[in-house]
Amino acid sequence: MLNFTLRCLRLYFIQKSRVFFSLLGALITFILYLAFLKDNMASSWPQLPGVNTFLDYWLLGGILAIVGATTSAAGLSQMVADKEKGVLADFLLTDLSYNQMQFGYFLASALISLIMQVLALVLLFTYYALTAGMTLSGLQLLQLLGAMVLSALVWTSFNVLLFGFVTSVTSFGHVMLLLSTSLGFFAGVYLPLGLLPQASRWVIQATPAPYFSSLFRHILLAPTQAAMTQQVPDFMLQQILRHTGVGLDVGFLTSASQEVLILLGFGLLFLILMPILGKFSRKLALHSL
């Protein structure tokens, strides 16, 4: 099974176009932020000290949330390609079982997601360190790594469920496009959650995306937020955090630890559903051979 997992990893990384397109959603978000979003948002809080620094960390948190989901999904493209080409039939003639192959796809996709999140953090942090003097402490880096591992596992569980019913590369591309496009909204990057109607916020908060975005932002903004409490009235700071999705309004403003628990709940739900829905996706996969 290790060789099967390594095969999936190798096939993902040797296709440069696949790697690029899995990061395309995050790249588009970054360009839109620099071109339009940052100035518009900064102008809304001219009295906020260090508003540009706040927004840079805020964006980085949102992009990491997007990358975790899209790269995990892209990592499962090989699973769909194997179904379409009938490669699964060849592997079933070996000592690999169907469940072992599914776990191999899961492990490869989770590793791809983790690697690409780390890469995105290194690239964006380097850019901001050089242009805006961004800094991160050792504790923040460890917390970010833990959040990235959780993101890789939760999103891969979700994507295995989603793409388990996709049997062609063409259909995979359509679903991937929809996922990449919608994540910018669900992660609260294209539009701050505070600007959305209450019904829309509840729909978005029924998915892991805003919680991951908020968790990353809690970690990245911790020193900035602590400094702002000395300069900004508490009611105003809470209003800004609620408006920008640093903490989710579920009757109260969620903390980072509460978001971790919520995300663990999502992960547990997806893991419970995997063997149930997996029976149907297995029939579909084997029927298409």
Image (cartoon, rainbow, N blue to C red):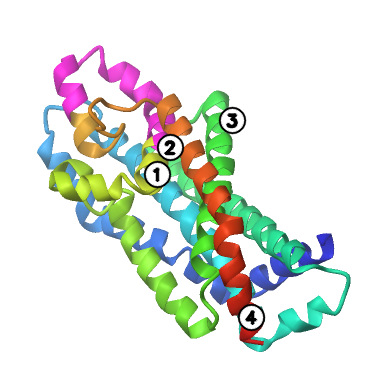
When asked about the image quadrant of residue 88, the answer is bottom right
**Mark number for residue 216?**
2
The residue where tag 1 is placed is 60
For the residues bearing labels 2 and 1, Cβ distance under 8 angstroms: yes
For the residues bearing labels 3 and 2, Cβ distance under 8 angstroms: no
- Residue 38 position, x and y percent, is 23, 47
- Residue 97 position, x and y percent, is 79, 67
Label 4: element kind: helix
Q: CA distance from mark 2 to mark 1?
A: 8 Å
Q: Amino acid at mark 4?
A: Lys
Sequence-first tag of 3 and 2: 3
Q: CA distance from mark 4 to mark 3?
A: 38 Å
Q: Residue furthest right?
A: 95
Q: Which residues are magenta?
A: 215-239
Mark 4 neighbour density, 10 Å: few (under 14) some (14–19) many (20 or more)? many
Mark 3 neighbour density, 10 Å: few (under 14) some (14–19) many (20 or more)? few
Please state if 16 lies on the left or on the right of 269 as rendered. Answer: right
Q: Is residue 114 visible?
A: yes
Residue in front for this viewpoint, 160 or 112? 160
For the residues bearing labels 1 and 4, Cβ distance under 8 angstroms: no
Mark 2 neighbour density, 10 Å: few (under 14) some (14–19) many (20 or more)? many
As for residue 193 lying within the magenta part, the answer is: no
Q: CA distance from mark 4 to mark 2?
A: 35 Å
**Is the N terminus in the top left, top right, bottom left or bottom right quadrant?**
bottom right
The residue where tag 3 is placed is 142
Query: Which mark's residue is nearer the viewer, 1 or 4?
Result: 4
The residue at 58%/35% (across/down) is: 146
Sequence-first tag of 4 and 3: 4
Q: CA distance from mark 3 to mark 1?
A: 16 Å
**Mark number for residue 83?**
4
The residue at 31%/34% (across/down) is: 53
